[in-house]
Amino acid sequence: MNTKVWKVDKYVDNLENNPQVVDAANFLRDNEVVALPTETVYGLGGNAKSDAAVEKIFAAKGRPSDNPLIIHIADKNQLKAFVAEVPEKAERLIEAFWPGPLTIIFKRIEGVLSETATAGLATVAVRMPDHPVALALLKSCGLPIAAPSANSSGKPSPTTADHVLDDLNGKIAGVIDGGATGIGVESTVVDCTEAIPVILRPGGVTKEQLESVVGEVHVDAALTDEAARPKAPGMKYRHYAPNAPLFMVSGTAKFLQGLVEEKRQEGLRVGVLTTEENARLFEADVVLTCGKRAELETVAAALYDTLRRFNLEKVDVIYSEVFPNTGVGHAIMNRLQKAAGNKLIIE
Ligand code: TXA
Ligand code: MG
């Protein structure tokens, strides 16, 4: 398959009628799959009502079929077609955070969306992305769009159209290149089917932000306890992994540098994932900086690109700094833990 690339400047007016966006929307209406920029990561979109379209998403990504997709909408009014009930707390979260990096789990009306998209669950995950190109595409096609991150299953999520093409060129109808995404980690997934909302996946909206709107918020036990079974099916898979084994290192720079030297003596090509503040403290074959510690948003924005760059550098092993587990650091550490398969070395 020849994968089309539509270049779209997100700052131009009237994006909904932009010929590139309209062309991509026509592919979606024909049940083809198209990658699109959002404010978090690139998504791989398909008509959420069509089994044929949704099956193409799963096939292109090599995604396990028990892992349901997030449904993307451009307008809150689209909810009533397939959501059984919008609880009062969910309503408040929608008012506060949509459009934005918050996915809400609702009880589902059966028979509207593809059962493949929802993996047969009684619930459905929905979000309204805060990206002008994504919103224009959703409006232009007039459909609810199922869209997981547009990477091959297991790889780091894509934050540029080039990342999408690295994984999916030839496997999808097209990609809208709207530049690099902003936030860099996926949306927060919050289950609002119970009295107290539960975070199933930390992301762009922090626990503190959610609590400021709805009071008490729980965190799924699986996010802190490795033995617990996660409620978001996707959270049980190893994810975001670079090709080389990745170790998180909790300790001083001197300790991390010692680990690097041991491996270099064994003749291995060693990578270090660090930050702008600390880069000068390390000497290794490949030292990549991932934003600034003092501004964790910049770390989130650069994380997946940095993990992908280690693959291009063909390192044998990677040691990474760790980050504070608060605010957006919660999402960063969650993704780093998954990329590392939880391998943590403590000084
Ligand atoms: O930022 C994002 O959310 C990106 C962009 C493209 O919107 N999308 C994304 O989708 O990250 P994906 O498929 O990579 O992750 C969806 C997560 C998975 O962990 C999945 O198991 C969970 O949401 N999920 C989907 N439907 C669910 C449901 N009904 N109940 C619990 N978890 C659900
Ligand atoms: Mg994903």
Image (spheres, helix red, strand yellow):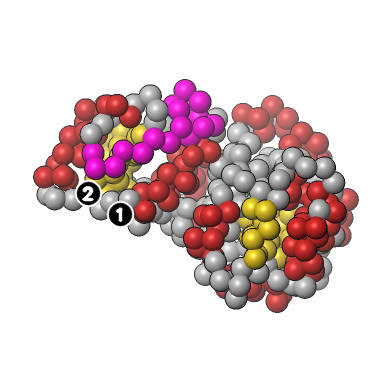
Identified at 54% across, 31% down, the residue is: 297
Residue 269 is marked as 2
Residue 296 within the segment the image draws in magenta: yes
User: For disc 1, does the CB lie below 8 Å from ligand 2?
Assistant: no
**Span colored in magenta:** 284-299
User: For disc 2, does the CB lie below 8 Å from ligand 2?
Assistant: no
In the displayed structure image, the side of residue 126 where residue 244 appears, left or right: left
What quarter of the picture does the N terminus occupy?
bottom right
In the displayed structure image, the side of residue 26 where residue 332 appears, left or right: left
For residue 199, say whether it is visible.
Answer: no
Callout 1 crowding tier (Cα within 10 Å): few <14, some 14–19, many ≥20: some
Marks 2 and 1 close (CB-CB < 8 Å): yes
Mark 2: secondary structure: loop
Give me the C-alpha separation between circle 2 and circle 1: 8 Å
Mark 1: secondary structure: loop
Marks counted in the figure total 2
Identified at 40% across, 48% down, the residue is: 309
Please, what is the three-letter code of the amino acid marked with disc 1?
A: Lys
For disc 1, the marked residue is 314
Residue 289 within the segment the image draws in magenta: yes
For residue 205, say whether it is visible.
Answer: yes
Identified at 66% across, 48% down, the residue is: 178
Q: Earlier in the sequence, mark 2 or mark 1?
A: 2
Where is residue 236? Give x, y as percent. 48, 57
Picture layout, residue 254 above or below residue 145: above
In which image quadrant can residue 69 be found? bottom right
80 or 71: which is nearer to us?
A: 71
Where is residue 182? Give x, y as percent. 61, 39
Identified at 80% across, 45% down, the residue is: 87
276 or 90: which is nearer to us?
A: 276
